[in-house]
C-alpha cells in the first residue's frame, strides 16, 4: 500500500547499514562516542535536583577534569566569578577531587581554624611533599609530631640569630652582585650605563644562597656551587601540580625527584655523622639545634628526620621568599618614586656622613616603616600561596553565617571532600579593600585604615599554643599571607629579615626601572610567580 512503501524502503536501508557495520566498527563508534556520552551524562547529572545540604556545584562540561582549566589559569579570577554566581560557598571538581571553597574572612576561619582531627592537611599535601622532603616529617607523620617538629625549628629562629643573619644576607647579596653575570654592567663601575636582570631567576639564586648561608649552615653553603644545586633543581621539579595530582608516574621528572631525594637525604645525614664524629667545631645553626632536641616521649630526633626537616625548610622558604622579593623589586622598578623613598629611608637610618652606608642591624631593620609597608603590600597583592587546602575526614557542617541553603538548614561537606580557603582573594577583595587591585604601600601607614586593622587582627592578642609556642589566632583576618592556626608559617620573621635585607642591600647599590610591561602572575607552578620575562633594568648608584 501507499502507507507501507516508505517504511519498507527505510527498513531495507537499515538492513543494508547493519550488515555493513561490522562488530569492530560498532565498537569503534561506541568508543569514539564515549566522551560525548560522558559529557552529556555529566551535564544531565548537574541538572538533576541536588541534595540540598551540598554546596552548589560549579557547572563544568567534562567529568573528572571539572573546572581544572579555569582554576589553573587564574584561581583568584575563577573564585571571583564563582562568587558572583554562587556566593561565598561553592563546590568545584578538580581532576576527580570535589573541592568546597569557602571565601571571605569567615571562610578562612572555617579552614584555618578547623579541628585537625576533622579537617586535615596531611592527606592533601603528603602526595606532593613526602616524595620531596622524605619520610617521617611534616605531612608524613601525625599532626602532633609536626607540631613538635615546628617547635624544634622555631627554637633556632630567634632574635639573636636574626641579628647575625642580616649581615650574612647583606654579604651574600653583595658578593652575588659583584660576581654574577646578570650584574655585569654594575660591575663595570659606570654610573651612566643601564643593565638588566631577570627578577625571578636572580632572586631565586639570591634566596637559596642566603638561606644556605643562614638557616642551612656552613657545610651546605660551601657545597652550593657543586652538586647540591643540581639535586635541589631535580627535587624542585618534583613540586608541580602534576606531581601533586599523580604521586608516581613513569616519567623522568619522577625518577629524578626520587634519586635526588635519596642523595640529598644522604648528604645531610653525612654532615650529621661528621658533626657527631668531630670535635664539636660547628656553628650553632638550625641543624645543630635539631641535634639537641628530643620528642616529648623522650625519643631523640633520628638523623633521617633531621635531614628531611632541613630539606622541608629549604623547599618551604624558597619559592615563597624568592617570588615575594621579585615582586617587591618589580613594583619598586615600576614606581621609582616609592623606590626613592625606600632608598632615602636607608640613607636616613644607615647613611654615613660623606657617603656610604653602615652595616644594617636587626633592631634598626625593624624600624623601617616604608620598607615594611612595601613588603606587606606586596604580600597582600601577591600572596605566593593562593589556595590553602585540607582533607575532610568526617562530614562537617559549614557555619550558616558563611552561607546556607535555607534559614533553617546548613551545608554539610561530606567526608572525602577537600575544603579550600583563599587568602589571596580576601586580601584583594574589592568588597573590603579600597582600590583592592592597586599596589599602594601607603595604605599600611594609615593607622586608622583597613590595612592596619587587618594587621591587628592577624597579630592579635588571642594567643594559642598548638604545640610550637604561642601564636596569634588570626584565622579571621582578611590578611593572612603566612596562614593561620596550627599550620601557620614558622618562617615569617625569617622571611621578613631575608626579604628586607636583600631589597635594602640592592637598593643601596642600584636604581631600578621596569623593562617592558608589568609581568602578569604565573599560576602554572604551585606558587604565584611573575611571568617570564620579568626583566628589571638597573643602573649603578654612586654609593661608595
Ligand atoms: C606554612 C607562607 C616563608 C616554613 C606556611 C603557610 C603559609 C606560608 C601560607 C600555611 C600553609 C597552610 O596552612 O597550609 C609563607 C610565605 C613565606 C614563607 C608567604 C615568605 C614570604 C617560609 C620560610 C620558611 C617557611 C622562609 C622556613 C624557614 C614554613 C613551615 C610551615 C609554613 C615549616 C608549616 C607548615 C604546616 O604546619 O603545615 N607558610 N611562608 N615558610 N611555612 Fe611558610
Image: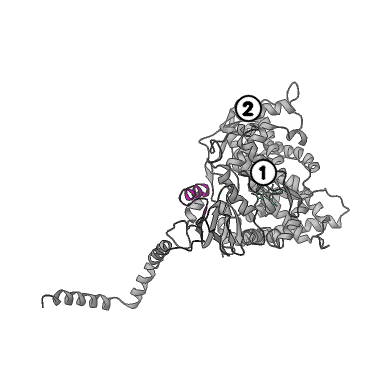
Along the line of sight, which residue is nearer the eye, 103 or 525?
Answer: 103
Identify the image's colour scheme: rainbow, by chain, secondary structure or one colour. one colour
Q: Position of residue 420 (x, y in %)?
A: 57, 54
Mark 1–mark 2 Cα distance, whole angstroms, equals 29 Å
Report the span colored magenta. Answer: 74-89
Along the line of sight, which residue is nearer the eye, 361 or 403?
Answer: 403
The C terminus is located in which quarter? top right
The residue under the point 54% across, 54% down is 101
The N terminus is located in which quarter? bottom left
Crowd rating for badge 1 (residues with CA inside 10 Å; few <14, some 14–19, many 20+): many
Toward which corner of the image does residue 247 lie, by quadrant?
bottom right
Position of 466 relative to 502 (above/below): below
In the image as oriented, which residue stretches furthest toward the front? 408
* Residue 375 is a magenta residue: no
Query: Magenta span: helix, strand or loop, mainly?
Result: helix
Residue bearing the label numbered 2: 340
Q: Secondary structure at mark 1?
A: helix
Toward which corner of the image does residue 371 lie, by quadrant?
top right
| Number of the front mark, 1 or 2 | 1
Q: Position of residue 170 (x, y in %)?
A: 73, 37
Q: In the drawing, what numbered circle is on residue 458?
A: 1
Amino acid at each position: 500500500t501507499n502507507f507501507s512503501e516508505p517504511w519498507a524502503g527505510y527498513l531495507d536501508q537499515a538492513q543494508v547499514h547493519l550488515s555493513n557495520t561490522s562488530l569492530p566498527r560498532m565498537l569503534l563508534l561506541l568508543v569514539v562516542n564515549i566522551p560525548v556520552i560522558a559529557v552529556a551524562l555529566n551535564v544531565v547529572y548537574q541538572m538533576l535536583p541536588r541534595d540540598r545540604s551540598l554546596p552548589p556545584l560549579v557547572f563544568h562540561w567534562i567529568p573528572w577534569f571539572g573546572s581544572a582549566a579555569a582554576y589553573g589559569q587564574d584561581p583568584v579570577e575563577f573564585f571571583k566569578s564563582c562568587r558572583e554566581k554562587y556566593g561565598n560557598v561553592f563546590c568545584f571538581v578538580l581532576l576527580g577531587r570535589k573541592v568546597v571553597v569557602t571565601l571571605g574572612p569567615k571562610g578562612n576561619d572555617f579552614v584555618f581554624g578547623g579541628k585537625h582531627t576533622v579537617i586535615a592537611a596531611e592527606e592533601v599535601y603528603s602526595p606532593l611533599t613526602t616524595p620531596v622532603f622524605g619520610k617521617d616529617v611534616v605531612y608524613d607523620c601525625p599532626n602532633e609530631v609536626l607540631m613538635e617538629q615546628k617547635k624544634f625549628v622555631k627554637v633556632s629562629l630567634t632574635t639573636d640569630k636574626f641579628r647575625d643573619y642580616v649581615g650574612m644576607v647583606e654579604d651574600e647579596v653583595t658578593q652575588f652582585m659583584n660576581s654574577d653575570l646578570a650584574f655585569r654592567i654594575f660591575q663595570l663601575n659606570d654610573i651612566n650605563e643601564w643593565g638588566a636582570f631577570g627578577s625571578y631567576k636572580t632572586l631565586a639564586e639570591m634566596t637559596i644562597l642566603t638561606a644556605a648561608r643562614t638557616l642551612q649552615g656552613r657545610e651546605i653553603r660551601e657545597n652550593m656551587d657543586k652538586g647540591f644545586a643540581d639535586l635541589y633543581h631535580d627535587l624542585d621539579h618534583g613540586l608541580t601540580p602534576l606531581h601533586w595530582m599523580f604521586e608516581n608516574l613513569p616519567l623522568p621528572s619522577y625518577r629524578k625527584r626520587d634519586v635526588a631525594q635519596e642523595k640529598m637525604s644522604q648528604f645531610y645525614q653525612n654532615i650529621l655523622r661528621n658533626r657527631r664524629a668531630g670535635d664539636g667545631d660547628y656553628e650553632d645553626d638550625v641543624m645543630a639545634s635539631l641535634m639537641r632536641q628530643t620528642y616529648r616521649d623522650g625519643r631523640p630526633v633520628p638523623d633521617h628526620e633531621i635531614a628531611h626537616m632541613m630539606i622541608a625548610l629549604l623547599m618551604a622558604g624558597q619559592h615563597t621568599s624568592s617570588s615575594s622579593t621579585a615582586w617587591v623589586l618589580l613594583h619598586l622598578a615600576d614606581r621609582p618614586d616609592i623606590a626613592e623613598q625606600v632608598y632615602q629611608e636607608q640613607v636616613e637610618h644607615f647613611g654615613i656622613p660623606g657617603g656610604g652606608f653602615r652595616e644594617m642591624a636587626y633592631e634598626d631593620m625593624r624600624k623601617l616603616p616604608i620598607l615594611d609597608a612595601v613588603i606587606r603590600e606586596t604580600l597582600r597583592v601577591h600572596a605566593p600561596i593562593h589556595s590553602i587546602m585540607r582533607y575532610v575526614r568526617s562530614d562537617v557542617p559549614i557555619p550558616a553565617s558563611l552561607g546556607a541553603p535555607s534559614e533553617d538548614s546548613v551545608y554539610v561537606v561530606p567526608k572525602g571532600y577537600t575544603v579550600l580557603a583563599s587568602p589571596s582573594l580576601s586580601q584583594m577583595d574589592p568588597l573590603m579593600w579600597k582600590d583592592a587591585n592597586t599596589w599602594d604601600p601607603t595604605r599600611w601607614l594609615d593607622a586608622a585604615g583597613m590595612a592596619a586593622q587587618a594587621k591587628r587582627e592577624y597579630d592579635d592578642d588571642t594567643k594559642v599554643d598548638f604545640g610550637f609556642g604561642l601564636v596569634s589566632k588570626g584565622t579571621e583576618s582578611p590578611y593572612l599571607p603566612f596562614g593561620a592556626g596550627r599550620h601557620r608559617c614558622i618562617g615569617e620573621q625569617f622571611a621578613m629579615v631575608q626579604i628586607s635585607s636583600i631589597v635594602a642591600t640592592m637598593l643601596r647599590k642600584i636604581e631600578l626601572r621596569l623593562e617592558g610591561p608589568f609581568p602578569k602572575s604565573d599560576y602554572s607552578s604551585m606558587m604565584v610567580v611573575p611571568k617570564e620575562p620579568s626583566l628589571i633594568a638597573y643602573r649603578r648608584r654612586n654609593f661608595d
